[in-house]
Amino acid sequence: MSLSTPTQEDLEELLLSCRYGDLEDIQQFVDNFGPDPLATARDDNGNTVLHMVAGNGHTDALDYLLPLLPPSLLAARNNAGSTPLHWAALNSHLSVAQKLVRFPGGPGVDLIDIKNSAGRSPLGEAETVGWEEGAKWFVEVMNLDESAKGEEELHTAEGADQIEVEIQDAEGQVAKMRLRQNSPSRAADKETT
């Protein structure tokens, strides 16, 4: 049986189904037309099926779509230069962001470094909307500047049990994180006093 080609109306309905997380309609589309048109469907603003499900936090639809799409679609940019990860960050969808970054064969953590037309990365978008949980996760998994490795060594002062780390992104945004150190010598000091 040969699959038919979707009309523009079919593609628009698919994008709406992705926007609203209607998994049954998405599955019906694939049954009728196969998975190939999923990769080329775009709205007037250049948004893909992944933009729609990521921006609206539909993890069940995302789980269904990811294996059917080329991994390059994870880095697809809309007319504003934003990727699906930007949209997940703008709308504070941590599980979606994690699935996009961790998808096997995809761009991985490099997605975090892609800047949109406004010059913001997904980390920058998370910071802009005040999404601390997402910003913290992005900082924990992102690629740090490889050229800076070995340039500075971090030395812990005697008796210090916390270190504050600041990371500045290309937009000048600063993410701060406190790391706690549990050294054997500190544990021994506590036991003997």
Image (cartoon, rainbow, N blue to C red):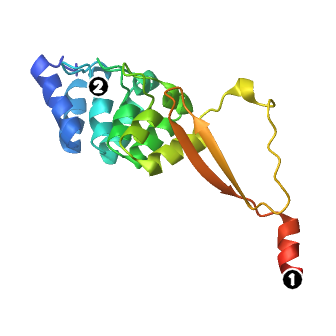
User: Do the residues bearing badges 1 and 2 touch, measured as CB atoms within 8 Å?
Assistant: no
Q: Position of residue 136 (x, y in %)?
A: 52, 47
Q: Is residue 166 above or below residue 14?
A: below
Quarter the C terminus occupies: bottom right
Q: Secondary structure at mark 1?
A: loop
Which residue is pictured at 57% across the width and 46% down the height?
A: 176
Q: CA distance from mark 1 to mark 2?
A: 62 Å
Give the quadrant of residue 168: top right
Q: Is residue 51 left or right of residue 19?
A: right
Q: Is residue 134 above or below residue 35?
A: below
> Is residue 128 visible in the rendered structure shown here?
yes
Quarter the N terminus occupies: top left
Q: Which numbered dot is residue 48?
A: 2
Q: Amino acid at mark 2?
A: Thr
- Which residue was labeled with disc 1? 193
Q: Is residue 93 above or below residue 85?
A: below
Which residue is pictured at 18% across the width and 37% down the height?
A: 17
Which residue is pictured at 35% across the width and 42% down the height?
A: 129
Which residue is pictured at 31% across the width and 26% down the height?
A: 35
Which of label 1 and label 2 is nearer to you? 1
Q: Amino acid at mark 1?
A: Thr
Crowding near pointer 1: few (<14 within 10 Å), some, many (20+)? Answer: few
Q: Position of residue 115 (x, y in %)?
A: 44, 23
Give the quadrant of residue 48: top left
Residue farthest along the left direction in this orientation: 9
Q: Secondary structure at mark 2?
A: loop
Q: Nearer the viewer, residue 42 or 14?
A: 42
Q: Position of residue 85 (x, y in %)?
A: 40, 34
> Is residue 7 visible in the rendered structure shown here?
no
Q: Position of residue 116 (x, y in %)?
A: 39, 22
Q: Earlier in the sequence, mark 1 or mark 2?
A: 2
